[in-house]
Amino acid sequence: MAGDRSARVRRLVAGNSLCPPDVLRRLAQDRSNRVRMAAAENWACPAGVLQQLAVDPDDGVRFAVAGNLSVPPEALEVLVRDRDPATAEAAAANPGCPAYLRVLWQLAHDTT
């Protein structure tokens, strides 16, 4: 199913929490940003794959990584500085985000 021609099928596989790590690794490199986004949202996605997706060219994929509760702090460090403001904010709001990164993000975005 992970090799299905239909992006919809691949997206459903990538979003399944029972999807094996090796399949998620492959789907994280899919040509469809929606498939990569489903992998990025999957809490069972391996840390290394989430780190890879944290620098994906698609804003939606990076935003999905930023909201994943399993994302490693190293990826959040990258995402807190993302060019997309919504992604950076989501990374700073992630409960796994180290406090110092959250404070740095708040200071950088303080408009008072």
Image: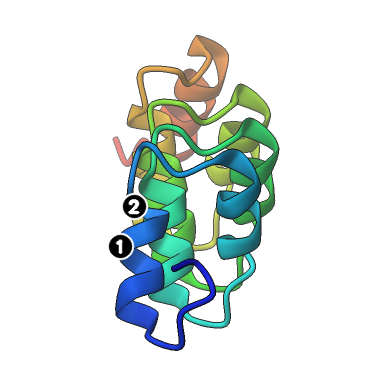
In the displayed structure, 4 sits above or below 29; it is below
Could you tell me if residue 54 is visible in this image? no
Measuring 59% from the left and 40% from the top, which residue is drawn there?
Answer: 21
Residue 79 spot, x, y in % from top left: 55, 45
Quadrant of the image occupied by residue 63: bottom left
Residue annotated with mark 2 = 15
Q: Nearer the viewer, residue 63 or 19?
A: 19
Q: Residues within 10 Å of mark 2 (few under 14, many from 20)?
A: many
Measuring 45% from the left and 33% from the top, which residue is drawn there?
Answer: 44
Q: How crowded is mark 1: few (under 14 residues within 10 Å), some or many (20 or more)?
A: some
SS of the residue at dot 2? Answer: loop
Residue annotated with mark 1 = 12
SS of the residue at dot 1? Answer: helix
Residue 53 spot, x, y in % from top left: 60, 54
Q: What residue type is labelled 1?
A: Leu
Quadrant of the image occupied by residue 43: top left
Residue 54 spot, x, y in % from top left: 60, 51
Measuring 53% from the left and 40% from the top, which residue is drawn there?
Answer: 80
Measuring 56% from the left and 34% from the top, which residue is drawn there?
Answer: 76
Whether the residues at callouts 2 and 1 have beta carbons within 8 Å, the answer is yes
